[in-house]
Amino acid sequence: MVKVHTLAKAIALSCGIVAAAGASVAQAAGFPDRPIRVIVPFAPGGSTDIIARLVTTRMSQELGQPMVVENKGGAGGAIGAAEAAKAAPDGYTLSIATVSTMAVNPACRPNDLPYDPIKDFQPVTNFANTANVVAVNPKFPAKDFKEFLEVLKKNPNKYSYGSSGTCGVLHLMGESFRMATGTDIVHVPYKGSGPAIADAVGGQIELIFDNLPSSMPQIQAGKLRAMAIAWPERIGSIKDVPTFADVGLPVLNQPVWYGLLAPKGTPMDVVNKLRDAAVVALKDPKVVKMLDEQGSAPSGNTPEEFAKEIQSQYDWARDVVKKQNIKLE
């Protein structure tokens, strides 16, 4: 009798599991049935915002529902990211991930960040990658990367490099460069890339670490000279500029990225449906062309691959911050 009762409970339990699974599939099959909110944790008009709107507009066509971008800037992306982390895990509130929100902020603010970049999110896919560059004022006494490194090593603490701000991704890139090359260059933080570029062009600083798209006009105009780029391969419009891997520094060959996140606990069938729509969008020739105009290249990797990408950058940022004793001012 006990065995029959146990068997009955087992059957009931298995039926419950099947019913629950069926409900989940039915839910995913009907997803989305209303607009999807996409939080961009930065102000309108920047690269993150432009790429998010470009890709999600095309995704909306594939999903049959609007994807509505909301800009929630502040605290280096922490305000928007924190709000996204607390959203219901149903696929209707998503957010855009960057190296800043998922790696640099957690490394620089380990004790007061209102979200956990690894535990609070379910990666969907990386939308696009963008190259970084180290460039110099044309009067700098070096024509190529080998000469550039020789000059820096022979003149410790003589030359200054600009970044978009203390404990930003470009500051960490500069410090990672120092570690990898054994050079001593002085960091000068700016409030954004624009003022740093202006001072590098004007000669107030000799070097700059930057996202390639914002420096490219000055490089092409001959007002800055690119020494190396962080990118998998050379770029056609500046094909004479080597990648960091080309010059024996693969650890520095890290582009920045812009990806899509869901809150942790979002059903994987919903996540996969979102990723599939993103892949379609990222193969659209119009989207590819517009990304190229932004200095970016489409990705569309799997949730698992994007999770590894995030973890890798998170570990890199923590390592640089710890070894270089970087503090937020």
Image (cartoon, helix red, strand yellow):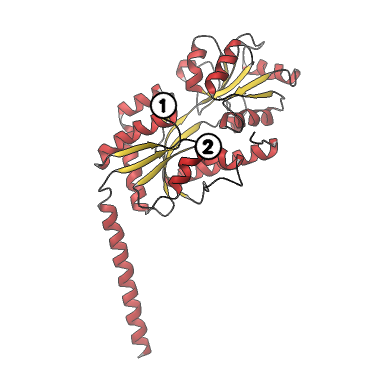
Which residue shows up at 35% across the image and 77% down it? 10
Which residue shows up at 48% across the image and 45% down it? 82
Image quadrant holding the C terminus, namely: top right
Q: Amino acid at mark 2?
A: Ala
How many tags in the picture?
2
The alpha-carbon separation of the residues under discs 1 and 2 comes to 17 Å
Per the image, label 1 sits on a secondary structure element best described as loop
Would residue 219 appear left or right of 247 to someone viewing this image?
left
Q: Quadrant of residue 195?
A: top right
Confirm whether residue 160 shows in the render.
Answer: yes
Q: Nearer the viewer, residue 252 or 233?
A: 252
> In x, y percent, where is residue 299?
41, 35
Q: Nearer the viewer, residue 221 or 233?
A: 221
Q: Which residue is mark 1?
A: 45
**Residue sitting at the far bottom:** 1
Per the image, label 2 sits on a secondary structure element best described as helix
> In x, y percent, where is residue 210?
55, 24
> In x, y percent, where is residue 19?
29, 66
Image quadrant holding the N terminus, namely: bottom left
Would residue 149 appear left or right of 99 to someone viewing this image?
right
Q: Nearer the viewer, residue 208 or 305?
A: 208
Would residue 266 appear left or right of 159 to someone viewing this image?
left
Residue 180, numbered circle: none
Q: Which residue is mark 2?
A: 75
> In x, y percent, where is residue 147?
67, 15
Which residue shows up at 31% across the image and 39% down it? 67
Q: Amino acid at mark 1?
A: Gly
**First reached walking from the N terminus: tag 1 or tag 2:** 1
Which residue shows up at 36% across the image and 48% down it? 271
Confirm whether residue 313 shows in the render.
Answer: no
Of circles 1 and 2, the one toward us is 2
**Residue 134 drawn above or below residue 317:** above
